[in-house]
């Protein structure tokens, strides 16, 4: 990209990108420390150099209101009038935390989490009297390999509004991700891969195209790899914003089954009749079919094989979650499944995921 154009895009986008400061009450932080939970504060114990958790927060880290900063992330304004900011769900996942955004000009404003996406790693914050311009949103479905992209974020929670430039180096990536060692893994699908540098603290910041439009939300890095950053397509956040406008919250459709996507290994291990579909199995959990769920009401059972959903074949390339991404919580759709050699077709009424 021409240097002058690149500088202009960054200059115009920078005011819309914010740092997110995560704070907890002193007593909550020290309670977590006492319980042995990671609080992000440690001391080096001589002479071994071994890090041990502190059970008392140093006074210099506590502000006048008794709050301790325990983390940070990034976000960007998507609606100035309503004061809406998009970030990652994992950035605002602390149960007892309060959130403050810091603007590019150094202002600090209290932020409220108004809704989170139960499927995608997306959250929406609201800030009163924001007065920060919104970034234009693009379309991630039009991306092509090799396109120039620009990542902006609060790198390492220290370097505010760090900019990196790269290309789209992969599309429709799928990973199992963890926000921290104590959180359960979450599958993220349909991700944009880029070689633009994304560091801890960049999470929630925008990934821009060569016209300055947001095409992704910086979300993850691959540990141990170099130049592999991943972003959530902005289309997921656009659906969330639409839900928020219509329903006042994010609504995602829910099926209610635990399953394994069938490949050759799963087929051989479980002696299945087909080499595609979703094998309904508890895999160590209490229920393969969640009681009272749409799948339960449609009559699905443990060891059924879901062959298609909404007339789309289920396989390693198109999973159940991929199909649900394009559906609404109240849709009624056809489902075809295999039970003891017999194909069964039914209608299934989806429900909102809580």
Image (cartoon, rainbow, N blue to C red):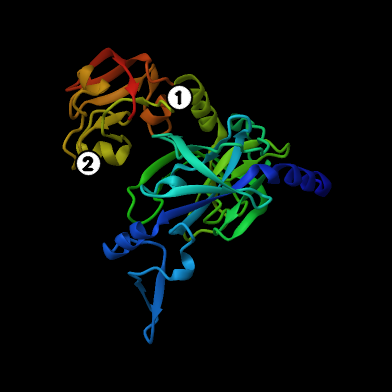
Q: Which residue is under mark 1?
A: 248
Of the 4 image quadrants, the one containing the N terminus is top right
Q: Residues within 10 Å of mark 2 (few under 14, many from 20)?
A: few
Residue placed furthest toward the bottom: 47
In x, y percent, where is residue 64? 49, 60
Q: Secondary structure at mark 1?
A: loop
Q: Which of marks 1 and 2 precedes in the sequence?
A: 1
Whether residues under marks 2 and 1 lie with C-beta atoms below 8 angstroms apart, the answer is no
To which quarter of the image does residue 155 belong? bottom right
Measured along the vertical axis of the image, is residue 174 above or below residue 160?
above
Q: Residues within 10 Å of mark 1 (few under 14, many from 20)?
A: few
To which quarter of the image does residue 320 belong? top left
Q: Which residue is under mark 2?
A: 269
In x, y percent, where is residue 58? 43, 71
Residue 299 located left or right of residue 1: left
Disc 2 to disc 1, how far (Cα)?
A: 45 Å
Specify the label residue 312 is tagged with.
Answer: none
**Residue displayed at 44% across by 21% down:** 247
Of the 4 image quadrants, the one containing the C terminus is top left
Residue 299 located left or right of residue 74: left
Measured along the vertical axis of the image, is residue 1 above or below residue 245?
below
In x, y percent, where is residue 106? 65, 53
Mark in the foreground, 2 or 1: 1
| Residue 319 appears in the picture as rendered | no
Residue placed furthest toward the front: 64
**Residue displayed at 35% across by 71% down:** 54
Residue 85 located left or right of residue 47: right
In x, y percent, where is residue 32? 31, 60
> Which of 290 and 131 lies nearest the eye of the viewer?
131
């Amino acid at each position: 990209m021409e240097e002058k154009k690149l500088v202009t895009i960054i200059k115009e986008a920078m005011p819309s990108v914010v740092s997110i400061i995560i704070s907890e009450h002193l007593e909550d932080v020290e309670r977590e420390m006492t319980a042995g939970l990671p609080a992000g504060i440690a001391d080096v114990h001589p002479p071994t150099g071994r890090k041990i958790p502190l059970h008392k927060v140093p006074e210099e880290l506590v502000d006048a209101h008794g709050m301790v900063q325990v983390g940070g992330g990034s976000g960007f304004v998507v609606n100035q009038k309503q004061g809406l900011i998009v970030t990652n769900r994992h950035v605002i996942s602390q149960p007892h935390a309060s959130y403050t955004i810091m603007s590019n000009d150094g202002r600090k404003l209290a932020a409220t989490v108004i809704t989170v996406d139960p499927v995608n790693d997306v959250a929406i914050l609201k800030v009163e009297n924001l007065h920060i311009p919104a970034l234009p949103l693009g379309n991630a479905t039009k991306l092509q390999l090799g396109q120039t992209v620009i990542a902006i974020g609060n790198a390492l929670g220290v370097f505010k509004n760090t900019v990196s430039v790269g290309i789209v180096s992969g599309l429709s990536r799928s990973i199992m991700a963890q926000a921290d060692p104590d959180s359960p893994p979450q599958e993220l699908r349909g991700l944009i891969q880029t070689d633009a540098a994304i560091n801890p603290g960049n999470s929630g910041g925008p990934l821009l195209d060569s016209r300055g439009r947001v095409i992704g939300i910086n979300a993850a890095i691959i540990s141990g790899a170099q130049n592999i950053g991943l972003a959530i397509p902005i289309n997921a956040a656009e659906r969330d914003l639409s839900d928020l406008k219509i329903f006042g919250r994010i609504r995602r459709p829910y099926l209610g089954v635990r399953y394994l996507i069938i490949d050759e290994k799963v087929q051989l291990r479980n002696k299945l009749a087909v080499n595609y579909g979703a094998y309904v199995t508890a895999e160590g959990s209490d229920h393969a079919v969640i009681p009272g769920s749409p799948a339960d009401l449609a009559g699905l059972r443990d060891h059924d094989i879901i062959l298609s959903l909404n007339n789309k074949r289920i396989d390693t390339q198109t999973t159940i979650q991929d199909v649900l991404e394009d559906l609404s919580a109240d849709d009624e759709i056809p489902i075809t499944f295999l039970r003891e050699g017999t194909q069964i077709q039914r209608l299934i009424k989806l429900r909102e995921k809580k």
